[in-house]
Image: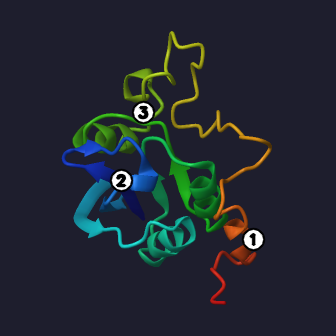
Amino acid sequence: MKIALSTFNDNLSVAFDFAETLLVFSVEDGIAKEKNEHLLQNVNPTARAAEIKKLDIEVLICGCISRCSYELLTQLGIEVISHVSGTVDEILAAYLKKEISKSEFCMPGFGRGSGRAGRCGQNRGFGRRHGKMCSEPYDCEINKLTKRGVLCQD
């Protein structure tokens, strides 16, 4: 299984959509065996989702993520654990121990005492602006996905 963390230096990046680096870990029997750094080449949400899918990532752990990127990744079969904050080592250890949703790893505003307890790592709280899921020009990018999780080439 491969998991990826969107990073900035030794921390999880605050916003996945602007992250430049992924740390990709191969996990076997609950132990991280191999670590590779991948420089993200795409900013367009559809192209970025395809890039991550080609890496055979099964789980993406990140800070904030746009609704559009979240939808694209999940439709490709990638589990997204968002609104997470901390160092790479802390987050990886918490994920492997199945403790990633603890409030100490939640981004500010998503943990205890914020009125939003329980949202960390659960991908809730995405707002809609003016009734739209994504802002232009990416509103229709989700429609380019096939039901098999492969991006159309047109």
What residue did someone put label 2 on? Answer: 6
Which numbered circle lies on residue 118? Answer: none
Query: In percent of the image, x 54 and y 65: which residue is there?
Result: 45
Label 3 crowd (10 A; few <14 / some 14-19 / many >=20): some
Question: In the structure shown, which secondary structural element does the residue marked by tag 1 occupy?
Answer: helix
N-term mark: 3 or 2: 2
What residue did someone put label 1 on? Answer: 143
Label 2 crowd (10 A; few <14 / some 14-19 / many >=20): many
N-term mark: 1 or 3: 3
Where is 71 relative to 96, above or below? below
Q: Amino acid at mark 1?
A: Asn
Which numbered circle lies on residue 99? Answer: 3
In x, y percent, where is residue 8?
25, 49
Residues at discs 1 and 3 in contact (Cβ within 8 Å): no
Can residue 7 be seen by looking at this rendering? yes
Q: Amino acid at mark 2?
A: Ser
